[in-house]
Every structure is written in C-alpha cells, then in structure tokens.
Image: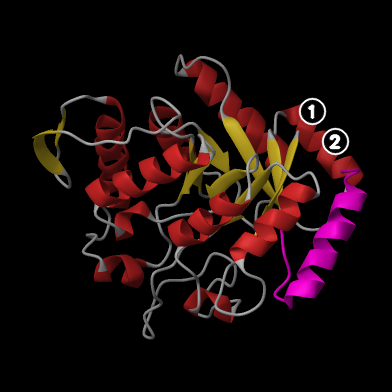
Amino acid sequence: MRHGITLFTSDRGIRPDVAATAAESRGFDSFYVPEHTHIPVRRESAHPGTGDETLPDDRYMRTLDPWVSLGLAAAVTSTISLGTSVALPLEHDPITLAKTIATLDHLSGGRVILGAGFGWNAEELADHGVPPGKRRTALREYLEAMQALWTQEEASYDGSFVSFGPSWAWPKPVQQPRPPVLIGAGATERNFAWIVRSADGWITTPTERDTVDNVHRLHKMWADAGRTGTPTVVALAGRPDTEQLSRWSDAGVNEVIFGLPDRTEDEVVAYIDRLAGKLDH
C-alpha cells in the first residue's frame, strides 16, 4: 500500500515545493493539494464536515492554485506522484484545463493523478456558471472532452456543456489514455455508480467511517459492471493506526494519504519526519 501526504495549501506556512521535496526525500509516494477558486461570503451550502454553512478552516479562503502548486512541486522532485485531493474541473474551461494537465504530466514524466470532485459549494460553482443539479453530467462531459484532446490526433467533442470541432492539441499526457481519474465523494450508490461508469477510482472523504465495507461494495459494483481489474482506492487518514492500515490494505485500499498541520515550515517538515518514522519509511 502506497503512502502519501496532502497539503491544504495556503498563502501562509510551508510552500508546496518545500513540502513535496520533504515528502519525496522521506520515502512518500505521492503529494496532493486541494482546490477552491474562491468562497462566496453568502452561502447556504452545507460543508460536509460541519453540516452547515460554516467552514472548518480559514484556508478554504486562502487556497493556492493547485496546478501552479504542483508545477512547483514537479520542478523540484523526480519520483513522487502529483495529485489533487480534490480539484474542481467544473471551475475551469475544459479545453484549457486539458492543456494544463497534459503539460504537467508531460513535464513531470507522467506523474499526475487527477483527483476530482463534483463540488459541495453550490454558490462557488454557480459563480462559474455550473447549473444546479447538473454537476455530474457536466463533469462527465468535461472528462470525456479532455480525454478526446489527450488521445485523438484530431480531437472533437459534442455535448451539452462542452463542444468543439476537429482540433489539434499537444502535448498529449505521458499516461494514456489519461492520467488516473479518482473521484472524491461520499460512499453513496449514486456516486459509486458514477465512478464505475466514468472514473478510475475513489478518494474517501474526511468523514468516511466504513471504509472497508464501502471498498468491498465498490469492488462488487465494478465487477458487476464488467470493468476489468479493480478501482483504485485512496483513503484519507489522520495519524497512522497500524491495525487500521492493515485492515484497509486487506480490503483493497491502494493508497493512504495523511494531512499536514497548518504550521510553520520547520514544524511541518518535522511532522513529515515523524510520520515517515511511524510508517517505517
């Protein structure tokens, strides 16, 4: 089972390139960052963690751009995977986002993992023109359109939310037909059905409580749909729990990622040191 870290990037504390370098040098396999373009002050959307409109962390308002952050990380590392936990593709133009991701995968030597979410913050999505109730359909089209640009010599796509005629677009990602697409969402039947149809795996939410049972359920849905192999499962964790990690590994969790504290650079690097020691890196 792989081990990674996720840094809730902000304009304070440790920089993403410093954190990624520290993680790679201490044996971690992956480095993830989140995304929020902005947080509307007036909201009715409930945060999944708090259950209401309040935010659990002011870094939601201060989040760095994920692709710039991962570009910095790519420039100073050579082996660690570079992922989003999670990005919000619907807050971008899909053609330019496809270019950004393909460029990062090309320049990093094929290290990108696209963790994507439907987006819990309806007001944030509305400012980007995403119609209410259409997040899943729009995200499916975005991913299909980006994959067309990533794989076809003359790419085209005709959907309700994305449409373009025959076009040339290079570079293509190193990873074909696309970098792994993992969906960060609750373990509902609807979300799992979406993953089985349109993605490569699942990232658990911070509030996930029945990881083992839900991994088994996702595996069954995957097999019943006739998909080969098994879905990639990335589990978010707090502090390492040896017994829990063993159960997750036996159940089919492929990777566990640990969050970093909102501290100074020296404190975060020391935390990565301690975490690596507990995981025998």
At 25% from the left edge and 30% from the top edge, which residue is drawn?
148
The x and y percentages for residue 85 are: 55, 53
Q: Is residue 13 visible?
A: yes
On residue 140, the disc is none
Mark 1 neighbour density, 10 Å: few (under 14) some (14–19) many (20 or more): few
Which residue is located at x 69 percent, y 55 percent?
21
**Left or right of 253 on screen, residue 26:** right
In the figure, 37 relative to 131: above or below?
below
Task: Say which of 127 and 270 sits in front.
Answer: 270
Q: 229 left or right of 277?
A: left
Which is the main secondary structure of the residues drawn in magenta? helix
- In percent of the image, x 82 and y 35: which residue is there? 247
**Residue 218 placement (x, y as % from top left):** 57, 30
> Residue 190: in sight, yes or no?
no
The residue at the far left in this view is 165
Q: Secondary structure at mark 2?
A: helix
For the N terminus, the quadrant is top right
Compared with 230, 180 (above or below) is below
User: Which disc is residue 250 wearing?
Assistant: 1
- Amino acid type of disc 1? Asp
The residue where tag 2 is placed is 246
Name the residue nearer the viewer: 101 or 56. 101
Which picture quadrant has residue 44?
A: bottom left
Q: Residue 52's spot in the image, x, y percent?
A: 51, 76
Q: Amino acid at mark 2?
A: Ser
Q: Find out whether residue 32 is within the magenta segment.
A: no
- How far separated are the C-alphas under marks 2 and 1? 6 Å
Range drawn in magenta = 259-281
The answer to whether the residue labelled 2 contacts the one labelled 1, judged by CB atoms less than 8 Å apart, is yes
**Mark 1: secondary structure:** helix
